[in-house]
Image: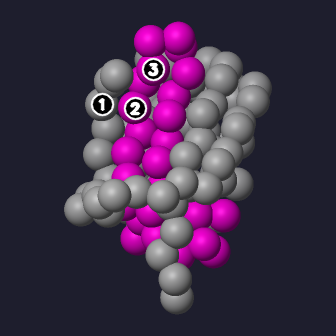
Amino acid sequence: MATIARRFHLAGKVQGVFFRASTRDVAQSLGLRGHAINLRDGRVEVLAVGEAEKITELESWLWQGSPLSRVEAITAEEVTLPELPAAFTTGNR
């Protein structure tokens, strides 16, 4: 299977509700690499790298999110990375 990279930006109640940690857990269970980071504007950025089918599964989960979150909008774009991430991490930007 070919490896692809897709970046998502999520808006809604996605910070302070365990969204990043939950996303990391789901992404790792799917064998994906990348990150989930809080952005200063209140959104969360998720970068997922792996098999297209697994990224599609993650995207479906992103609409659900963590139990306390409320996702209102998601934008997605295919990206080309100069270097592939080694794991799935969380953080802030």
Which amino acid type is shown beneath numbered disc 2?
A: Ile
- What residue sits 62% from the left and 18% below the top? 13
Q: Which kind of residue does numbered mark 1 sit on?
A: Gly
Q: Quadrant of residue 69?
A: top right
Report if the CB atoms under discs 3 and 1 are less than 8 Å apart. Answer: no
Residue 37's disc is 2
**Extreme-right residue of the structure:** 72
Q: Are marks 3 and 2 in contact (CB under 8 Å)?
A: yes
4 vs 12, left or right, is: left
Q: Disc 1 on helix, strand or loop?
A: strand
Q: Say above or below: 18 vs 40.
A: below
Taking the magenta stretch, the answer to whether it contains residue 31 is yes
- Residue kind at label 3, given as amino acid type: Leu
In the picture of the structure, the residue carrying the numbered disc 1 is 91
Q: Is residue 21 left or right of residue 44?
A: left
| Spot occupied by residue 32 in the image (x, y as percentages of width and height) | 42, 65
Identify the residue at horizontal 70%, vertical 38% (top origin): 75
Rate crowding at label 1 as few (under 14), some (14 to 19) or many (20 or more) other CA atoms within 10 Å.
Answer: few
- Asked if residue 8 is positioned above or below residue 42 in the image, the reply reads below
State which region is magenta: 30-56
Classed neighbour count for the residue bearing mark 3: other residues with Cα under 10 Å, few (<14), some (14–19), many (≥20) = some
The residue at which mark 3 appears reads as 39
- Whether the residues at callouts 2 and 1 have beta carbons within 8 Å, the answer is yes
Q: Is residue 54 visible?
A: no
| Disc nearer the start of the sequence (3/1) | 3
Q: CA distance from mark 2 to mark 1?
A: 5 Å
Residue 76 shows up from this direction: yes
Q: Quadrant of residue 84?
A: bottom left
